């Protein structure tokens, strides 16, 4: 599915830009990073990965809210970032890859029939990438 289909299927909808929602989503993202770090510290690796992804997702939503876009699909959020931020060189392709990988891992952990386990180093890497992702998004939002 591409960005055009996301809009056609109303998985993404145009609305009014909302700076307040954008700021709130970033605030939630930052809180989730702290929560992911606490989960890591206590050995809840799968939950930490899910929470790190949630932080990335919320920060991505901050961009969408800034642009007046509302989502109903995690996949379409990634497509929106690719089309509107990566292709315009405002966001690194590495960030897009990270959010997409963690989106898939979150889906497997929550809905898959097999238990998913992660090593501590994988979770530490996810949290570090999440922090960088949030910083990049915050920079984009503050510049516009």
Image (cartoon, rainbow, N blue to C red):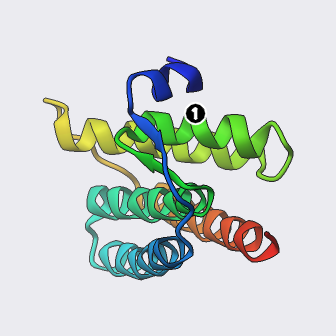
Classed neighbour count for the residue bearing mark 1: other residues with Cα under 10 Å, few (<14), some (14–19), many (≥20): many
Whether residue 68 is visible: yes
User: In percent of the image, x 28 and y 36: which residue is there?
Assistant: 108
**Image location of residue 82, percent across then percent down:** 67, 37
View extreme (left): residue: 113
User: In percent of the image, x 78 and y 48: which residue is there?
Assistant: 92
User: In percent of the image, x 56 and y 60: which residue is there?
Assistant: 125
Residue behind mark 1: 79
| Apparent side of residue 87 relative to residue 69 in the rendered image (left or right) | right
**Image location of residue 94, percent across then percent down:** 72, 45
Q: Which of 1/18 is in front? A: 18
Q: Is residue 108 above or below residue 48?
A: above
Q: Is residue 59 above or below residue 86?
A: below
**Image location of residue 91, percent across then percent down:** 77, 51
Q: Is residue 140 above or below residue 5?
A: below
Whether residue 93 is visible: no
């Amino acid at each position: 599915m591409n960005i055009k289909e996301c809009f056609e299927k109303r998985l993404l909808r145009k609305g009014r830009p909302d700076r307040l929602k954008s700021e709130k989503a970033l605030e939630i993202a930052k809180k989730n990073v702290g929560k992911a770090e606490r989960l890591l510290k206590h050995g809840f690796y799968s939950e930490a990965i899910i929470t790190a992804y949630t932080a990335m997702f919320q920060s991505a939503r901050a961009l969408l809210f800034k642009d007046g876009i509302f989502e109903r699909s995690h996949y379409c959020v990634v497509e929106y970032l690719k089309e509107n931020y990566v292709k315009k060189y405002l966001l690194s392709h590495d960030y897009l890859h990270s959010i997409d990988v963690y989106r898939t891992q979150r889906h497997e952990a929550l809905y898959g029939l097999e238990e998913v386990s992660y090593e501590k180093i994988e979770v530490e890497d996810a949290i570090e990438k999440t922090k960088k992702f949030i910083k990049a998004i915050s920079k984009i939002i503050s510049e516009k």
